[in-house]
Amino acid sequence: MPRELDEDDVRVRPGRGKSRPRTKDRPGHESAAAAFVTQVDRGRYTCVLDDRAGTEVTAMRARELGRKGVAVGDRVALVGDVGGGDDALARIVRLEPRSTVLRRTADDDDPVERVLVANADQLVVVTATVDPEPRAGLIDRCLVAAYDAGLEPLLCITKTDLKPPDELLAAYGALGVRWVAVSRGEGVGTVAEHLVDRVSVLVGHSGVGKSTLVNALVPGTGRATGVVNAVTGRGRHTSSSAVALPLPDGAGWVVDTPGVRSFGLAHVDPSRVVTAFPDLAGGIEQCPRGCTHDEPECALDQWVAEGHATPERLESLRRLLAARTAADAY
């Protein structure tokens, strides 16, 4: 005769979410600590708190950030263990709005944009007069990226004790780009003056002396320096990732980036580049729709002929626009 079942024989499995109802509301984290991201390394973010001590905290992204990426220079909000220490790990729960974003693509036909640095004020393009030889294509591309991102460019010319910078200055004189010269043991103080109270990104080919310059600007940093290959004339990569370093006495931040051999500009809209040429703006307004500014119908030639701008300025604009798509520009 079969046994009769009672309540002890019945297992009731509670439905999912019964014990903790789902909600679309997310915590506001009003008491989260404000911080500045100085380095990104395999899903871990080094952040410096906005406290008087400048406490360094390691953090990871919280789930509520979704797919939002975090880059060096980002202003973030942290919760969890924000006391610092080797075993402490906080969470980034909020990404503050960015004032600027410096991007690049690996190549001109690469649709994936890579954020190099957020919230920077100026882009310092470091180039040597010799060993390795200056590559105007890369300099032009960096200038285009700076104008597109709303950063003020600064041309830093190194190794001027080996060769004067006259040729470089002549090539970029019409652009009105600020510049500073550095030689062995001289000029670092002048560079530092341009970095005060700013977040400055240093970009340049490997071997131009960028890491050496950073070590002089931020003593004790110990950024690795390399040599130039005598056969190829190219430098060896010595920086593997971007890192923000505080200038002495809290005078600003300098962001050292890995040495680059290409600077793709697939993401750049040409219309944003021309905003850096206000003296040509009137002529651009008269150009036909969709004008690339290097075609016979372009109104800029007449604008220059009427004396509103110099031929050198128009040539510089067209050179920068051409640099966006020139396969051998760098």
Image (spheres, rainbow, N blue to C red):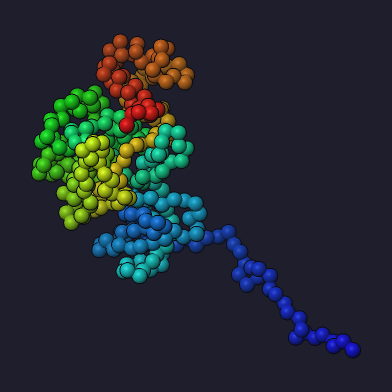
- Say if 108 sits above or below 210 in the image: above
Q: In x, y percent, where is residue 210? A: 22, 43
Please state, as top left, top right, bottom left or bottom right, where the N terminus lies in the image.
Answer: bottom right
Residue 191 appears left or right of 328: left
- Say if 313 sits above or below 211 in the image: above
Please state, as top left, top right, bottom left or bottom right, where the C terminus lies in the image.
Answer: top left
Residue at far right of view:
1
Q: In x, y percent, where is residue 31? A: 40, 64
Q: In x, y percent, where is residue 318? A: 34, 21
Residue at point 38% right, 40% down? 103
Relative to the observer, which residue lies in front, 313 or 5? Answer: 5
- Say if 150 sits above or below 84 in the image: above
Residue at point 23% right, 40% down? 229
Residue at point 26% right, 48% down? 238
Relative to the observer, which residue lies in front, 140 or 177? Answer: 140
Any part of residue 179 in sight: no
Any part of residue 315 in sight: yes
Residue at point 42% right, 20% down? 292
